Image: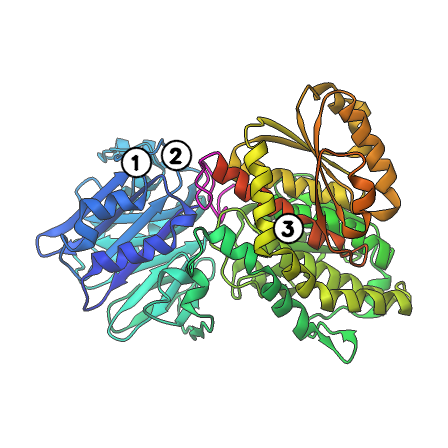
Amino acid sequence: MCGIVGYIGQQQAAPILLDGLAKLEYRGYDSAGICVFSPDGFCVEKTKGRLSALSELIDDGKAITGTLGIGHTRWATHGAPSHENSHPHLSTNGKISVVHNGIIENYLLLKDYLLRHGKTFRSDTDTEVVANLIEYYYEMDGDLLCATRRAIEKLTGSYALGVLCIDCPDSLIGIKKNSPLIFGFGKGENFIASDVPAILKYTREVVYLNDGDMVVFNSDSAAFYNALGEQIEKKPEHIAWEMSAAEKSGYPHFMLKEIHEQPKALRDTISPRIRGGRVVLDDLDLSPDYLRGIRRIYIVACGSAYYVGCLGKYILEKTCRIPVEPILASEFRYAQPVLGDDTLVVIISQSGETADTLAALREANNLGARTLAIVNVVGSAISKAAHDVIYTWAGPEIAVATTKAYSTQLSVIYLLAMYIGDLLGTLPEAEYKSMLKALQELPDLLSSVLTTEYLDHIKHLAGELYQNHDVFFIGRNLDSATCLEGSLKLKEIAYVHSEAYAAGELKHGPISLIEQDTLVVAVAGVPELFEKTMSNVKEVKARGANVLGLTTEDLEGEIHKTVDRYLLVPKTHPLLQPSLNVVPLQIFSYYMALARGCDVDKPRNLAKSVTVE
């Protein structure tokens, strides 16, 4: 969960490295550092804290000369954020410099071995083991490529690495296993990076490295090798989206920008898949015969994507009449799931690199299930490993707290449910047409929520409620899953203790936590369960709760009788209602975070792409 950048070319490297790291700071912001091959050898500068501290230290990079270097922005795993633990790390004799994203699981064993062979360590990190291990083998025969390959053969865990050697002033090595790494082709310059935004300013031609791949490159050429050490050809992919998609474009925060981008993201994801009045998923190879033989669908994901899966259970079971089980990826792979060719495993991930989710996908493949990935990043590890893939066209999402990725993932669940329901004949034609019409109208309905007046109203509510230290979200059926996401947003960016419960479970324990003025957010967007949810609201109000309600516009006359404050959204098809209900909760969390003085885009202890277990 760190960001790495590497550059070699004709320009001064340090400013380019800093610029790239600034685009990757969502991946980690505990510390930052760079190593540049200067006329006097390696020049390493690093510091605890945000990237801005490093930029100030080296005058935005102008203080360091040299046209070859590597950079890193860190999310701490091994060792606290500190100068010593910041990357890049040097080997004992200072000849090898390494940046690393991932976790080396057997680093203690390797460290003990290296200590016994005369190597020294300055940090608490697992990464320093890599630098010393490469040095150890390099000292044997002076072949850097061979030494690097021998070193990574000893590593257990995940890594994306950038490697420099003092004896090789005109080349850089990149290696990937279970952590993202791309290579960028420039003109008289080349790059490696954890993600496209870091280098999009300089090139649009990139290669997504596969697990086990290694690239050795200089300013004019690159040689790619597979896990067997065989040289291979890699064709670049062209990145079409604009640089502005990864910039704030006048918004104070990426999160607010991405909330406002949701209508377009939904439209981009939905519209190409509707042709001739039907949902068309060209890339799927799911025949009616196969679908009729499915015994169970698992939806496997982490965080917000898992909450999409919780909604998916209700949506897919109602439309397709197949049992659906959402399960956390970190639990799935260790649960010994009963899988086979009669099981469809749907994998959801924004980045397509989420470590637990990728491991769960591989486990499902090994056990003989069919796997279908819902991801945002083309060429990502999950998209390559799954049997089928449906891309969400959300564009880059920079804010740590997801908004448009969540919404587009949910829209793909709608498309998938309608597609399967249509093939199986379990979704009546009238219902199919009703859902299709509502799905096409969804982007415009969402736009109607994102008005200045509506946001100002929520900002005002947050200003009244931000001092609450405990918040409970309650809802039933689809709303209970939406509550999980609303609660997570509040925890992630406003640092408010927040819990989400199915409203019917209140009497089984949670109601004992309700005290005078405890804030309860009640989501009541399922029409046939509205009165039951209001009964639960009355139960918490009887114990002193302060209730913020959320329902559809047609129920305004009813909800105001029971709650203290309320938010309204347009009414749509019942199965699609969660797409509208979640948006006010995203906005509420955003303004709660601002009122509490939190850093919205860089919440403490969190990073955007979780590429470690």
For disc 3, the marked residue is 583
Q: Quadrant of the N terminus?
A: top left
Of callouts 2 and 1, the N-terminal one = 2
Q: Are marks 2 and 3 in contact (CB under 8 Å)?
A: no
Locate residue 259, reporting x and y percent. 56, 54
On residue 85, the disc is 1
* Label 3 environment density (alpha carbons within 10 Å; few <14, some 14–19, many ≥20): many
Q: What's the residue at 47%, 58% (across, down)?
A: 211
For disc 2, the marked residue is 78
Q: Which residues are magenta?
A: 596-613
Q: Is residue 498 magenta?
A: no
Locate residue 448, reporting x and y percent. 66, 60
Q: Is residue 229 left or right of residue 516?
A: left
Q: What is the total number of numbered labels drawn onto the structure image?
A: 3
Colour pattern of the rendering: rainbow
Locate residue 323, reporting x and y percent. 83, 50
Measured Cα–Cα span from mark 2 to mark 1: 8 Å
